Image (spheres, coloured by chain):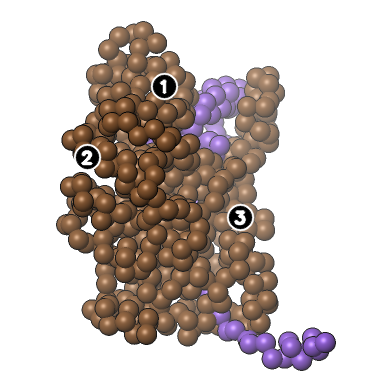
C-alpha cells in the first residue's frame, strides 16, 4: 500500500500511510526504495487481533488519528541518498574470516559462509555468458535496485556456484524480474521461498540431481543455485533484515529451496511432456521455471502402488483436501495460483500404464478436490474482503460453479484452473511417492525462461572440466 | 605450536566487490504540500484489502468528522484493492480517480 501512497504523492496529493507496529521497520526502507524515504506514517501501536474492540477503537480514534493529522500537516526534509559503489570498486580487503565478518555485519549473507567475491572470481563466471557485465536485466523491488549480469555473477560466486552455472543464474533472475512474478511481495508475512525447476539438456550438463533426495541439499548444482536464488533476493531485491530496518517480513519463515530438476528420461519413456513444454517451450530446450513455494505437503503416497485411479484418489484426499484447501481461497479470489505436484518415476509409470497423462491428473484434482463455501469464505484471501463467493460470481470474478446455491455447506473446487497445476517427475526411481507444493497465489507466479547459453558453451564446459 | 601472528601474516587477503545492486530509485522526491487544516478537504481512502483492516476506516472517519466538521471522504471501494493481483492496474488508475474526485489527501492502509 505504500506504492499507492507514493502514486498519490507523485500527482500532488498528500498521503499518510497506516502501519501496524510490526511493520514499521519494513515501511521506512520500502518507502525509501520508492524514492520517498520520509513518507508520513501513522503507527498503530499494538499487535493486530490482540487488542480488545474498545482498545482498538480508542487507539485508532486518538493515537492513529493524531498521527494522521500531524502526518498530513508536516513539513518533511528530503535527505540526499548515499552514493553506491561501482561494480569493480573494492569495498573491503581482508582475510577469509574478516570477509565473513564484514559480510555478516552488513547482512550481505544468509548466515552461511560466502566465497569472497573477488574480481577474478566474478570474471570466471562472466566467461559463461556472452552478455555484457553492465547489462541491466531488470529493476528489482522492493529495494528498487538494478539486477545486472555483473551482480548475478557476484552473488553466484558468494553462493558457492560453479562458473558454468551462470546461464541458469541469469535465467532465474530474468524470471524474478518479470512484473508478474511480483518480487516486491516476496517479503510478505506468509514467508514464501522461490523454487527453481530445471528442464532440458542443462539438467545433465550441470549434473543436477533428479533422483533420490531430489529436494535435499547435497548436490552442488541443486544446492548452490537454490541458495543463490534466495541470496540474490536478499542482496539485490533488498529482502533482508537490517540492523534497524527490514524489507523482509516473513513472520516465521522457512529456508531456501534446492533446485528441482525434472527427470526427462522418465518423462520421455512414458510419453509425457516435461514441464518446459507445458509452459510453451520446444522439447529439448533448457528452461528454468521459478515460482513461490509456501509449504510442502506430507508424503502423499505410501508403499502401496495400486492403479492410477487409486493413486490419484489418495493424492486428492491427502493433498487437495488437506492443507492446500485451507490456502485455496486467495486462489479463488485472485485467479492466480500455481500448485505443484512432484511424483516419482514409478508413480508416473503407473499413471501412464493406465492411460493417464499429466493433464488427466490435473483435471481429476480440479473435479474432485473440494472445500465448503463456508470454509472458503472464512479462509485467507477472502475473509476480510467483505465478499461472499456468490457476490464474486455475480461480479464475474468467479465461475458460476462457485455459487450453485446459497447453502454455505455446498462444495466448491479447491483448484480454480486445472491447467495451473504443475506435475513434475523427479525423485527416487525405485520408490513410489508424491509430494505437493503450495505457492502463494499471485506472489511468485510460475514464470519460465530459456537458459541462454554462450556461443562457446560446449568448449567452455570441456575446458572447465579438463 | 604455530605462531598465530605468523599464520595470520600468511593468510590470503581477499579484495571483494559489492554484492548489492545500484539504486534505480532516482533522486528523492519531495512530498506534496502539507495540509494544515482538514476542514472542507476531501480525503481519499486507499485500502490494501488485507485481513479485516478495513475496521480502521469507520473509526477514522468518525474521529476526523468530530475535529473537522466539513471534511469529506471518498470510500476505498472507489479506488480498488491496492495490494491485490491487479495492483499495477489499480495504482495506474489512481491519478485519474484522485483528480476526478478532487481528492486533497489520502489515507492509505493498512500495513499488516
Chain of the residue displaying label 1: A
Answer with the quarter of the image where residue A72 lies. top right
Q: Is residue A332 visible?
A: no
Chain shown brown: that is A
Q: Vertical placement of A93 versus B77: above or below?
A: below
- Shown colour of chain B: purple
Residue A342 image point, x, y percent: 36, 44
Q: Same chain, marks 1 and 3? A: yes
Label 2 and label 3: CA atoms lie apart by: 47 Å
The answer to which of marks 2 and 3 sits earlier in the sequence is 3
Which residue matches tag 3? A241
Label 1 and label 2: CA atoms lie apart by: 34 Å
Which residue matches tag 2? A352
Q: Residue at x 42, y 69 (%)?
A: A152
Front residue of A429 and A142: A429
Q: Residue at x 37, y 81 (%)?
A: A465
Helix, strand or loop at disc 2?
helix
Residue A150 image point, x, y percent: 41, 75
Q: Is residue A389 visible?
A: yes
Q: Vertical placement of A153 versus A425: above or below?
A: below
Label 1 and label 3: CA atoms lie apart by: 33 Å
Residue B56 image point, x, y percent: 56, 27
Give the mark count.
Answer: 3
Numbered disc in front, either 1 or 3:
1
Answer with the quarter of the image where residue B11 lies. bottom right
The answer to which of marks 1 and 2 sits earlier in the sequence is 2
Front residue of A66 and A188: A188
Helix, strand or loop at disc 3?
loop
Chain of the residue displaying label 3: A
Residue A222 image point, x, y percent: 43, 61
Helix, strand or loop at disc 1?
helix
Which residue matches tag 1? A376
Amino acid at each position: 500500500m505504500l506504492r499507492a501512497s507514493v502514486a498519490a504523492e507523485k500527482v500532488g496529493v498528500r498521503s499518510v500511510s497506516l502501519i501496524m507496529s510490526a511493520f514499521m521497520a519494513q515501511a521506512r526502507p520500502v518507502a525509501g526504495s520508492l524514492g520517498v524515504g520520509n513518507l508520513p506514517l501513522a503507527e498503530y501501536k499494538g499487535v493486530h487481533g490482540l487488542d480488545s474492540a474498545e482498545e482498538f477503537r480508542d487507539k485508532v480514534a486518538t493515537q492513529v488519528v493524531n498521527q494522521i493529522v500531524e502526518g498530513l500537516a508536516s513539513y518533511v526534509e528530503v535527505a540526499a541518498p548515499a552514493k553506491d559503489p561501482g561494480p569493480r570498486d573494492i569495498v573491503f580487503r581482508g582475510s577469509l574470516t574478516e570477509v565473513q565478518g564484514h559480510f555478516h555485519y552488513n547482512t550481505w549473507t544468509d548466515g552461511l559462509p560466502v566465497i569472497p567475491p573477488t574480481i577474478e572470481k566474478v570474471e570466471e563466471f562472466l566467461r559463461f555468458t556472452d552478455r555484457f557485465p553492465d547489462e541491466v536485466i531488470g529493476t528489482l523491488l522492493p529495494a528498487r535496485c538494478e539486477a545486472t549480469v555483473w551482480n548475478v555473477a557476484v552473488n553466484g560466486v558468494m553462493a558457492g556456484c560453479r562458473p558454468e552455472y551462470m546461464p541458469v543464474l541469469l535465467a532465474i533472475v530474468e524470471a524474478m524480474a518479470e512484473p508478474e512474478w511480483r518480487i516486491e511481495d516476496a517479503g510478505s508475512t506468509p514467508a514464501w521461498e522461490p523454487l527453481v525447476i530445471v528442464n532440458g539438456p542443462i539438467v545433465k550438463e550441470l549434473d543436477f540431481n533428479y533422483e533420490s533426495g531430489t529436494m535435499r541439499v547435497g548436490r552442488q548444482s541443486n544446492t548452490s543455485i537454490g541458495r543463490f536464488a534466495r541470496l540474490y533476493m536478499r542482496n539485490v531485491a533488498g529482502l533482508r533484515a537490517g540492523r534497524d530496518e527490514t524489507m523482509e517480513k516473513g513472520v516465521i519463515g522457512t529456508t531456501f529451496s534446492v533446485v528441482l530438476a525434472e527427470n526427462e528420461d522418465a518423462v520421455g519413456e512414458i510419453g509425457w511432456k516435461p514441464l518446459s513444454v507445458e509452459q510453451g517451450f520446444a522439447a529439448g530446450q533448457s528452461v528454468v521455471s521459478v515460482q513461490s513455494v509456501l509449504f510442502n505437503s506430507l508424503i502423499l503416497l505410501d508403499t502401496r502402488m495400486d492403479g492410477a485411479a487409486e493413486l490419484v484418489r489418495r493424492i486428492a484426499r491427502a493433498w487437495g483436501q488437506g492443507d492446500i484447501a485451507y490456502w485455496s481461497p486467495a486462489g479463488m479470489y485472485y485467479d492466480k495460483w500455481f500448485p505443484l505436484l512432484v511424483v516419482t518415476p514409478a508413480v508416473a509409470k503407473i499413471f501412464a500404464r493406465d492411460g493417464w497423462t499429466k493433464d488427466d491428473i490435473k483435471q481429476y484434482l480440479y473435479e474432485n478436490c473440494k472445500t465448503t463455501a463456508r470454509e472458503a469464505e472464512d479462509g485467507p484471501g477472502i475473509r476480510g474482503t467483505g465478499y461472499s463467493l456468490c457476490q464474486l460470481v455475480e461480479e464475474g470474478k468467479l465461475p458460476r460453479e462457485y455459487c450453485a446455491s446459497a447453502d454455505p455447506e455446498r462444495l466448491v473446487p479447491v483448484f480454480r484452473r486445472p491447467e495451473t497445476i504443475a506435475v513434475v517427475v523427479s525423485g527416487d526411481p525405485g520408490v513410489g511417492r508424491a509430494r505437493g507444493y503450495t505457492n502463494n497465489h499471485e506472489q511468485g507466479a510460475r514464470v519460465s525462461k530459456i537458459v541462454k547459453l554462450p556461443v562457446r558453451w560446449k568448449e567452455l564446459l570441456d575446458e572447465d572440466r579438463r | 605450536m604455530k605462531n598465530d601472528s605468523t599464520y595470520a601474516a600468511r593468510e590470503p587477503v581477499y579484495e571483494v566487490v559489492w554484492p548489492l545492486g545500484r539504486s534505480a530509485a532516482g533522486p528523492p522526491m519531495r512530498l506534496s504540500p502539507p495540509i494544515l487544516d482538514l476542514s472542507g478537504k476531501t480525503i481519499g481512502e486507499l485500502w490494501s484489502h488485507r485481513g479485516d483492516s478495513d475496521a480502521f476506516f469507520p473509526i477514522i472517519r468518525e474521529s476526523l468528522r468530530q475535529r473537522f466538521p466539513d471534511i469529506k471522504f471518498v470510500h476505498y471501494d472507489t479506488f480498488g484493492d491496492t495490494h491485490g493481483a491487479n495492483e499495477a492496474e489499480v495504482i495506474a488508475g489512481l491519478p485519474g480517480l484522485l483528480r476526478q474526485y478532487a481528492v486533497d489527501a489520502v489515507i492509505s492502509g493498512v500495513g499488516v
